[in-house]
């Protein structure tokens, strides 16, 4: 993420984002984590076929637990951000802190 207001993306892409979907953003500390044999953490493979209720907190818990089991050590900070759309009609929205 670039937070500098002077930098603007050269193009913008729009993708559908339905209320039952969860968007996961993460830092390079996650994608560069390695196991004892030097293999990178295969996030996409580990999420393939995963069935969770649309809960940002549960997704973050799953990824963090999976990553810490996989990685021999974490040499960089790891940031995880998971969001979902609130449904119309006043349905409550889960918030995951920590």
Image (spheres, helix red, strand yellow):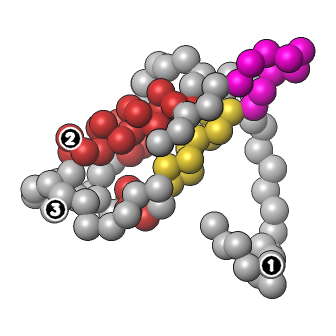
Q: Is residue 75 magenta?
A: no
Q: Residues within 10 Å of mark 3 (few under 14, many from 20)?
A: few
Q: Which residue is mark 1?
A: 5
Q: Residue 42, image x and y in percent?
A: 33, 48
Estimate the spatial distance between the alpha carbons at disc 1 and disc 3, rounded to whole Å: 37 Å
Report helix, strand or loop for mark 2.
helix
Residue 33 visible in the picture: yes
Q: Residue at x 81, y 62 (%)?
A: 12
Q: Nearer the viewer, residue 80 or 18?
A: 80
Q: Which dot, 1 or 3, sits closer to the camera?
A: 1
Q: Nearer the viewer, residue 39 or 73?
A: 73
Crowding around mark 1 (Cα neighbors within 10 Å: few <14, some 14 to 19, many 20+) is few
- Disc 3 to disc 2, how far (Cα)? 14 Å
Provide residue 61's location: percent of width, then percent of height: 41, 33
Q: Which mark is residue 69?
A: 2
91 is within the stretch colored magenta: yes
The disc placed on residue 38 is 3
Q: Is residue 70 left or right of residue 14?
A: left
- Helix, strand or loop under label 3: loop
Highlighted magenta segment, given as a residue range: 85-93
Lateral position of residue 19 relative to residue 34, left or right: right
């Amino acid at each position: 993420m670039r937070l500098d207001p002077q930098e603007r993306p050269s193009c913008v892409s729009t993708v559908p984002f339905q209320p039952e979907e969860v968007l996961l953003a993460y830092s390079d500390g996650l994608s560069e984590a390695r196991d004892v044999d030097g293999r990178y953490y295969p996030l996409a493979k580990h999420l393939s076929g995963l069935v969770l209720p649309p809960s940002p907190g549960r997704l973050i818990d799953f990824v963090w637990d999976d990553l810490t089991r996989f990685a021999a050590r974490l040499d960089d900070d790891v940031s995880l951000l998971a969001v979902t759309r609130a449904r119309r009609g006043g349905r409550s929205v889960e918030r995951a802190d920590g």
